[in-house]
Amino acid sequence: MASKFVLDFPLLFLNREEAAVIDALVGHIIPAEPGSPGAREAGVTEYIDRALAGFLRELQPVYRSGLLALARLTTEAHGKLLHELGEEQQLGIVEKLAAVSEDVPDAFEGQFFRIVREHTVQGFFGDPAYGGNRNLAGWDLVGFPGAQWGYTPEQMAPDFDVRKIPMLTIKDLYSRIGGVK
């Protein structure tokens, strides 16, 4: 059965159906595992939507064309859009896109997949101020303490457990100096 897309943020560029397709795609690029959230749970779709409405707006035509190409691919193969397919069928489409991305670098579908994959990684590991990395999921996964003013000599030692450093976002840092609340 297809996973249900939960729209819990305002869309700025994508429409609801496009966001559901992107959400299904990113959910297979960085899937959730037991005890570890994936791209969906980390808000990567929100990051991509915000980025396309803002600093990545020059990629809007690429996303529109890519989503249309993906719709053609999935409807020709299964008669439905990606987010309407079951998990196994979705995974098959994503694997096909990944293979095209590697085997036929000039194919548009492969180029689109590489772009979405790169944006998925950005949204998963970037500062939450940009819409992704909800609950610091990406940082927690790799043990990154987030935005810091600096580190003590003890914290810089090779055997120091960085998980002892409280995770901070850019917003946290600014709130400490009387900036953003």
Image (tube, rainbow, N blue to C red):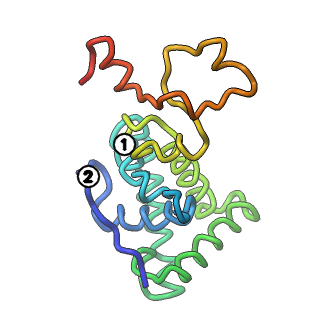
Distance from label 1 to label 2 (Cα)?
9 Å
Q: Pointers 1 and 2 in contact (CB under 8 A)?
A: yes
Q: Is residue 141 above or below residue 8?
A: above
Q: Name the secondary structure under disc 2.
A: loop
Looking at the image, residue 43 sits to the left or right of residue 148; the answer is left
Q: Is residue 145 above or below residue 23?
A: above
Q: Quadrant of the C terminus?
A: top left
Which circle marks residue 9 in the picture? 2
Residue 96 location, quadrant: bottom right
Looking at the image, residue 52 sits to the left or right of residue 66; the answer is left
Which circle marks residue 131 in the picture? 1
Question: x%, y% of residue 71?
Answer: 45, 74
Q: Name the secondary structure under disc 1.
A: loop
Q: Residue at x 52, y 47 (%)?
A: 119
Local packing at callout 2 (Cα closer than 10 Å; few below 14, some 14-19, many 20+) is few
User: In the rendered structure, which disc, 1 or 2, sits on the residue that comes first in sequence?
Assistant: 2
Looking at the image, residue 66 sits to the left or right of residue 117; the answer is left
Local packing at callout 1 (Cα closer than 10 Å; few below 14, some 14-19, many 20+) is many
Q: Is residue 34 above or below residue 176?
A: below
- Type of amino acid at the residue the image marks with label 1: Gly
